[in-house]
Image (cartoon, grey):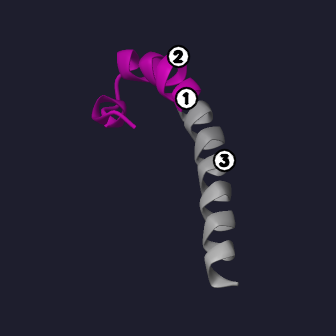
Amino acid sequence: MPLHCHFDNTHCHIDYFNHCHFDNNQNQKKLKTDNYQLIKKLARNLI
């Protein structure tokens, strides 16, 4: 999350909801996929 999102002002909130929030949703989906791949890889190595 960009640092400017931490400052409590109107511009920041507009920024946060228009930009950060959307980015965050995209990143979460990607992270879940990446983590899933990583776990599968680790599991294969353990067996």
| In the depicted structure, whether residue 47 falls above or below residue 35 | below
Q: Is residue 18 left or right of residue 2?
A: right
Identify the residue position indicated by label 2 in the image. 18
- Between 2 and 33, the one nearer to me in the picture: 33
Q: Label 1's element?
A: helix
Q: Residues within 10 Å of mark 3 (few under 14, many from 20)?
A: few
Residue position for label 3: 33
The segment highlighted magenta reads 1-23
Labelled disc at residue 2: none
Q: Are marks 1 and 2 in contact (CB under 8 Å)?
A: yes
Residue 29 image point, x, y percent: 66, 40
Q: Position of residue 31 (x, y in %)?
A: 58, 47
On-image quarter of the C terminus: bottom right
Tag 2 and tag 3, C-beta contact below 8 Å: no
Look at label 2 and name its amino acid.
Asn
On the image, the x and y values in percent for residue 46 come to 64, 83
The residue sitting at 60% across, 31% down in the picture is 26
Cα distance, mark 2 to mark 3?
24 Å
Q: Is residue 15 magenta?
A: yes
N-term mark: 1 or 3: 1
Instruction: Work out whether residue 38 or residue 5 is closer to the camera in this orientation and state it.
Output: 38
Residue 39 within the segment the image draws in magenta? no
Looking at the rendered image, the disc whose residue lies closer to the viewer, 1 or 3, is 3
Residue at image mark 1: 21
Under circle 2, the secondary element is: helix
Q: CA distance from mark 1 to mark 3?
A: 19 Å
* 33 to 21, vertically: above or below: below
Q: Amino acid at mark 1?
A: His
Image quadrant in which the N terminus is located: top left
Distance from disc 1 to disc 2, alpha carbons, whole Å, reads 6 Å
In this view, the residue in front, 25 or 35, is 35
